[in-house]
Image (cartoon, rainbow, N blue to C red):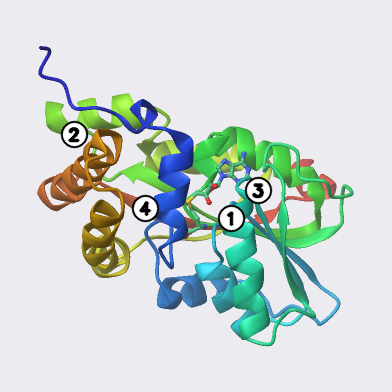
Amino acid sequence: MENKQPSIYDFDINLICDYYAGLHRQGPGSPEVTAQALSFIPPLSSSATIVDLGCGTGGQTMVLAEHTQGKIIGFDLFPPFIEAFNRQAAALGLSDRVEGRIGSMDSPPFEPGSLDLIWCEGAIYNVGFEHGLRLWQPLLKPGGYVAVTEASWLTQERPAEVQAYWDANYPGIDTIPNQLLMLERAGYDLEAAFVLPETCWTEQFYKPQESWQETYLKRHADNPAVEAFIANERQESVLYDRYKAYYGYVFYIARKRTAHETAF
Ligand code: SAH
């Protein structure tokens, strides 16, 4: 048998989503980091419209809601995530201005020039960093903002094992200088960029999964597909621990460049 690590594409999407629906977050991040990214954006008024693309169950969206005024629309492809999102918004008394909708980030149904802020944590990889940024830029009002996290190489070179892992799972990962160029080419001016602290992966993302994995395995006893999936998840966190000096998530906060600014 070929001794090859599976990639995420080897698993059933329904299994992946069902597993992640039981977690507060579906990707690395933290309330502190969400608030930090928001601090680079001028305060929004109560008439502002914010869209959170690939919102998942809304971990970061509820933090956004706590720190902003205005209407927030969470968008995700997977209905159970949106159900959990709307339950959470209701429990927090936010349903009047925070709403989850099912939809795809590759065709967000918003009028050009209608959005004040587009948020996207740990999800732009689904359409590709530059492609997503280009697609969403026209939807922003002049001077509107985008805030996204993306997987980035933190060094120019890296060990073969970690390169092979990303080649199999997300070959679109790139270096920070290249991502800054993509951002500029997509019609934005950079406001700030920072690497997410390790705890966003370890404490916030992998640790809550440990007990959930036990529960999930018990719930799906003798299911080889579930066992293989959980083994893959565990391997991913081992890989992070071993190679965290080489990759991470970067928060990019940028402002839509307006027509007169591009003339220079
Ligand atoms: N922002 C959340 C979830 C990140 S996981 C967090 O940081 O916790 C990536 C999310 O993207 C998942 O919820 C997945 O269902 C969603 N997704 C995948 N493809 C999508 C698409 N084309 N449009 C919208 N959401 C998508």
Q: Which residue is mark 1?
A: 80
Q: Which residue is mark 3?
A: 188
Mark 2 surroundings within 10 Å by alpha-carbon count, few (fewer than 14), some (14 through 19), many (20 or more):
some
Label 1 to label 4: alpha-carbon separation: 26 Å
Query: From the viewer's perspective, is the residue at label 4 or at label 3 nearer?
Result: 4
Q: Which residue is mark 2?
A: 162
Residue appearing at x 49%, y 39% in the figure: 125
Query: What type is the residue that disc 3 sits on?
Result: Tyr
Residue appearing at x 12%, y 13% in the figure: 2
Is 66 located above or below residue 137 in the figure?
below
Marker disc for residue 249: 4
Q: Earlier in the sequence, mark 1 or mark 4?
A: 1
Label 3 to label 2: alpha-carbon separation: 31 Å
Measuring from the top left, give residue 110's x and y in whole percent. Answer: 84, 50
Q: Earlier in the sequence, mark 4 or mark 3?
A: 3
Residue appearing at x 67%, y 43% in the figure: 105
Q: Earlier in the sequence, mark 4 or mark 2?
A: 2
Q: Which element is circle 1 on? A: helix
Query: What type is the residue that disc 4 sits on?
Result: Tyr
Query: What type is the residue that disc 2 sits on?
Result: Val
